[in-house]
Amino acid sequence: FLLNVGNVSFGELLEVEENSYTKEEMLVVLSMVTVLLYMVRRVIIPGYKIG
């Protein structure tokens, strides 16, 4: 019985880790896109206006 409970909880933990891992990947991609957009606004657009 304890072994079965351990297997169920272990499976649930794996599922949670997989979901959180995919969410972390999405957050990393979103943060990278945000940084790129910020750099474009701060560097390329002012340079284009000055040029």
Image (cartoon, rainbow, N blue to C red):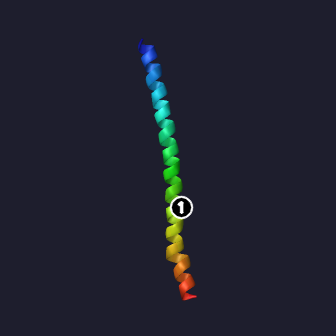
Question: Label 1: how many residues lie within 10 Å, few (<14), some (14-19) or many (20+)?
Answer: few
In this picture, residue 51 sits left or right of residue 16: right
> Could you tell me which secondary element the residue under label 1 belongs to?
helix
Locate residue 19, reporting x and y percent.
49, 39
Q: Is residue 41 above or below residue 1?
A: below
**Residue depicted at 50% across the width and 74% down the height:** 41
Locate residue 35, reporting x and y percent.
50, 64
**Residue depicted at 44% across the width and 20% down the height:** 6
The residue most toward the bottom is 51
Locate residue 22, reporting x and y percent.
52, 44
Tell me the residue that label 1 is attached to.
33
Q: Is residue 44 above or below residue 29?
A: below
In the rendered picture of this protein, how many numbered marks are placed on residues?
1
**Residue depicted at 52% across the width and 71% down the height:** 39
Q: Amino acid at mark 1?
A: Val
Quadrant in the picture for the C terminus: bottom right
Q: Is residue 51 above or below residue 43?
A: below
**Residue depicted at 53% across the width and 76% down the height:** 43
Locate residue 23, reporting x and y percent.
49, 46
- Residue 4, image quadrant: top left
Quadrant in the picture for the N terminus: top left
